Image (cartoon, rainbow, N blue to C red):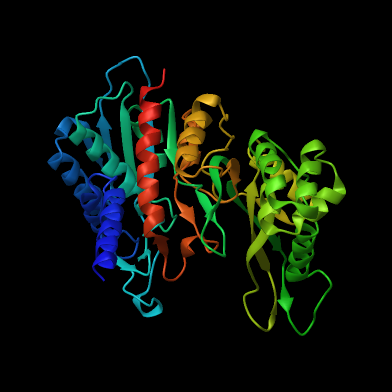
Amino acid sequence: MLKFAAALAATTMLASAAHAQQPGEANFRALYKELVETNTTFSAGSCTLAAERMAARLKAAGFADSDLTLFTPPDKPKDGGLVAVLAGKDPKAKAILLLAHIDVVEAKREDWERDPFTLVEENGYFYARGASDDKAQAAIWTDLLIRLKQEGYKPRRALKVALTCGEEGGGQVNGAAWLAENRRDLIDAAFALNEGAGGALDSAGGKPVVHNIQAGEKTSSSFRLEAVNPGGHSSRPVPDNAIYQLARAIDGVAGYTFPVQMNDTTRAYFTKMAPIVGGATGAAMTAIVANPKDAAADATLSKDANYNAILRTTCVATQISGGHAQNALPQRANATINCRIFPGESPAAVRDALVKAIGDAKVEVSQPSKSRGEKTAPPLTAQVVGPIEKISAQMWPGIPVVPVLQAGGTDAGPLIAVGIPTYGVSGIFYDPDLGRLHGLNERIGVKSLLDAREFSYRLVKLYAEAK
């Protein structure tokens, strides 16, 4: 019994020693909790308050007022953000920008198992709205500056952290776009690190499978289809009907498939994923890289919505309305077609393709609102990828690092549009449910979060010293 107790004590000491490899973890947990529990929804929250609280922590760690810029878009007092700077030793070396958004999507208490705005640690997970998207990254970046400051570390390149609002599109001003348009000087950098990619865990044992780098994302752009008609009394129908006309137009869109497009990111993705996936799907990945016009490979891959989404521009009907009375012929009918545009393709070219697919000049195709910048994929240079591969190999040996094109949207777009290459890399490994992002009971693994904190610390220091 005494031997067992001694062995148990030794095991506990070893575990504590391993755990102690992350300095300042208690402070990080407190910072993370404060940020997550600061409500930043559009309906009831304040990004400005969250930014102020993070600024207070940075100031307490020794950052001067001149290192901290709290900003608020005009007439939007709750949509503020923060840019914090750890000065570099070489004034000629461009900074590294660390970007994260602090707004979150809405969450109703009655729908959640736990209070969505109280951070709960349970069964190896943190649960709360924003526990992952994107306050995990925001907390990691803020804590990183504090950790480096307290170490007395002076990087060769300046390190900038930008915490912004409005990425979720719920009605707040997009802070990244606002900075790009109004305070480009504050965020000027050689490149930026952002959300948008992470690692994948298997469904069986939660083991790492692949570590992704986001290099490029598709542009979200919505188009409006509209059919108009003089209308009349429903008791005297005629073939010329606005709703029928719109229905045929939608059918034309549904029947059209944009051609396969490839860039450096998707070629690298399918090349590296082919041996991991294997089988007929892996063979199709190899074939599509060799020949993007391979119809058989396209057919195989396109059965999977995730692969189809990064092979081409996609357009889908998402909203429809028409008519003004149940006893009248419709005078107007319209639909929204949401497109996710492959990097490098213009919204104008997509509109032209939709017009051709519809084949009816009487159906107007318009773009009601301008998309947030036409997006191009930033280059996957050795200077960017090499450090990620190095630290990833240290922490997750044998796990491949694979570039990925993001089918969804992040704040990378506004930065890329003004010449700041932006990459998604977090070191956060997710279960197959992707942490239930935007859904009920959002969560992140405690180990995943702490590992990502260490990954980011090591990675940013490599970038900070790079020549």
Quarter the C terminus occupies: top left
Q: Is residue 465 left or right of residue 364?
A: left
> Does any portion of residue 256 appear in the rendered image?
no
Along the viewing direction, whichever of 451 and 234 lies nearer the viewer = 451
As displayed, is residue 35 above or below residue 387? below
> Does any portion of residue 397 appear in the rendered image?
yes
As displayed, is residue 428 above or below residue 108? above
Q: Position of residue 342 (x, y in %)?
A: 66, 42
Along the viewing direction, whichever of 101 and 329 lies nearer the viewer = 101
- Which residue is pictured at 72% across the width and 66% down the height? 229
Along the viewing direction, whichever of 13 and 186 lies nearer the viewer = 13
As displayed, is residue 295 above or below residue 423? below
Q: Position of residue 181 (x, y in %)?
A: 40, 34
Along the viewing direction, whichever of 253 and 106 lies nearer the viewer = 106
Quarter residue 182 falls in: top left
- Which residue is pictured at 41% across the width and 54% down the height? 448
Q: Position of residue 433 (x, y in %)?
A: 53, 64
Quarter residue 454 falls in: top left
Q: Is residue 409 left or right of residue 270?
A: left
- Which residue is pictured at 34% across the width and 38% down the height? 457
- Which residue is pictured at 21% across the width and 53% down the height? 26
Q: Is residue 97 left or right of residue 368?
A: left
Q: Is residue 300 left or right of residue 159?
A: right
Quarter the N terminus occupies: bottom left
Q: Position of residue 5 (x, y in %)?
A: 25, 66
As displayed, is residue 382 above or below residue 198? above
